Amino acid sequence: MLRLDVITVMPRFFESALAYGMIAIAQKKQAAEVYLHNLHDYGLGNYKQIDDRPFGGAAGMILMCEPVFAIIEKLQTERTYDAVIFLTPDGEPLKQSIANELSLTHNLIVLCGHYKGIDERIRETLITREISIGDVVLSGGELPALVLIDSIVRLIPNVLGDSESALTDSFQDGKLDSVHYTRPAEFRGLKVPEVLLSGNHKKISEWQQQNAVERTLKRRPDLLSE
């Protein structure tokens, strides 16, 4: 079972996402478990302070060292973690290969940033992996964390209804997935390619592979050059 400990300033943000979809299925099947930790519980003083103004006079607020160190070090006394992940725009781009790799781990900490950022000493000392979901700045790391978690848990055996489905997803073999059709075979004069109705599995597989290459060349040629 994969255990994910998520550190956030907004734990309620995750409630609906954890109750539905693949993440909920993974937990129900005991393939994964997600624990939410409210960073405010480790804040300083009567007001549970977790952030402060940055040195140097820049705009915004920065998550402080003390609360983050306190929760991560507490968790690390309880078990060994395969990675302590920080979601950040300047991290390594999230790719299918990363999701594949992390789906094979046992214990992960996921730190959601907030406000302007986090004290750099947290990154230098505690964080072992930094991941970005794209070249865009969001208001916090909660949405990226959910994207990361969903991409991981759906790959755990028996979570998907058809476990082989994930093996043919886009990016699994360095290409986009081929196009797909379902019933009816003709809709408003638009027909499904005949080969997909032929029942010839060899020809269907060859068509799907060729279609995947063509779509990748058209939409994401960069994938074929990697």
Image: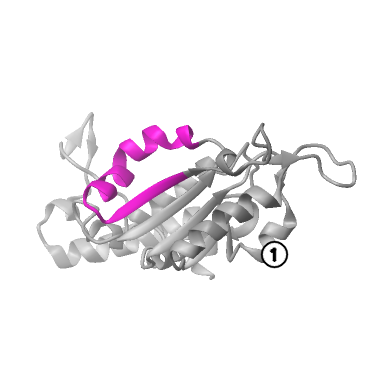
Residue 72 percent across, percent down from the top left: 55, 57
129 to 47, vertically: above or below? below
- Residue 101 is left or right of residue 196, and the answer is right
Out of 150 and 105, give the one closest to the viewer: 105
**Residue beneath the point at 49% across and 53% down:** 219
Q: In this rendering, does residue 31 appear at all?
A: yes
Residue 100 percent across, percent down from the top left: 39, 65
**Residue beneath the point at 63% across and 36% down:** 139
165 to 49, vertically: above or below? below
- Residue 114 is left or right of residue 145, and the answer is right
Q: Mark 1 points at which residue?
A: 124
Residue extending farthest front: 46
Residues in magenta, as a range: 11-36
- Residue 155 is left or right of residue 130, and the answer is left
Is-magenta flag for residue 3?
no
Residue 134 percent across, percent down from the top left: 58, 50
**Residue beneath the point at 28% across and 50% down:** 26
**Badge 1 element:** helix
Q: In this rendering, does residue 99 appear at all?
A: no
Among the 4 quarters of the image, the one containing residue 158: bottom left
Residue 211 percent across, percent down from the top left: 34, 58
Is-magenta flag for residue 16?
yes
